[in-house]
Image (cartoon, rainbow, N blue to C red):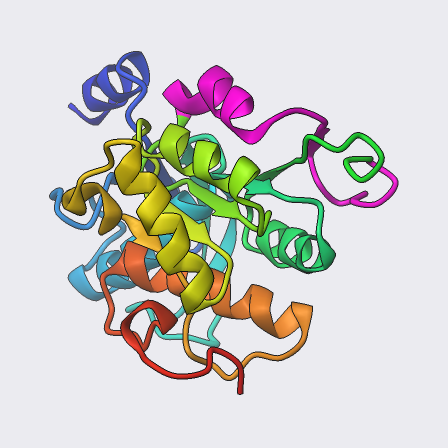
Amino acid sequence: MMFESLSKLLKEEIPFALVTIVEGPSKGAKLLVQSSDKPLEGTLGNEELDRVASRDALGELAAGRSGVRHYGLHGEAREEAIQVFIESFAPPPQMLIFGAVDFTGALVKVAKVLGYRVTVCDAREIFATKKRFPQADEVVADWPNRLIDKVGHSLNAQDAICILTHDNKFDVPAVLASLKTKVGYIGVMGSRRTHEGRLTRLKENGVSEQEITRLRSPIGMDLGARTPEETAISVVSEIIALRTKRPMHALKDTVGPIHG
């Protein structure tokens, strides 16, 4: 029955993770994990081990990674009675970063640690170079909205768009194009005053109040970030919190200065 499910998921390109015991009791036992709201299929031997392994499998699946984990017989941490291999069947999440600015390099580094496939895009060819952003998977010299028009169909809830351009001629078209996609996160850098001016232009272009709620601006969580690296961490923290539906203190929902 599990192999029928695997075949169906692969055929329909639905992300899933397969957990297999490679060392220990019940060697070869498998657990099929889809999402937190889908029932598990199969078992590794007991309910607690299934619970812990499925939790870790969902984390690997969200990052598009595969790897080995060790547990006690009932899922205990820091024990090695059981070794499992978690295999993710999903492309890594995508992050599109628009704007080759000071913060971009830091955000690329943090996003890569979290398993994102990162594309940096800027219409200014002199700034959009692989030499400046060696850790990015792709660096594109083009207008943001044109890139989104090309790849927007592939974006979904696990993906992110971060608009760091600070220039209405770039970021307004980028936001308009982003709102046409199913991307899970649209973050736009800028002060509250900058964002108010941006909202005026977006509304002039027919953007509704409901669509505006998808925008995260000022971008990031209220961590008191000062450096590019700290700002990058605040951005990915907001992305994670939105994806996991956990409470957060976002800059979007605060007043006053956005820097500590």
Q: Nearer the viewer, residue 116 or 66?
A: 116
Give coordinates of residue 190: x percent, y percent. Answer: 50, 61
Q: Is residue 194 visible?
A: yes
Q: Is residue 164 left or right of residue 69?
A: right
Q: In the image, which residues are magenta?
A: 130-154
Decide: is 179 above or below 70: above
Give coordinates of residue 188: x percent, y percent. Answer: 46, 52
Q: Nearer the viewer, residue 154 or 67?
A: 154
When asked about the image quadrant of residue 5, the answer is: top left
Q: Is residue 164 magenta?
A: no
Residue at x 53%, y 20% (from the top left corner): 146
Residue at x 78%, y 44% (from the top left corner): 133
Give coordinates of residue 4: x percent, y percent. Answer: 20, 17
Q: Is residue 138 magenta?
A: yes
Q: Is residue 40 visible?
A: no
Taking the view exactly as shown, the residue that stands out farthest to the right is 131
Q: Is residue 229 left or right of residue 196?
A: right
Q: Is residue 36 left or right of residue 170?
A: left
Taking the view exactly as shown, the residue that stands out farthest to the bottom is 260
Residue at x 41%, y 38% (from the top left corner): 175
Residue at x 82%, y 36% (from the top left corner): 130
Q: Nearer the viewer, residue 50 or 221?
A: 221
Q: Nearer the viewer, residue 174 or 241?
A: 174
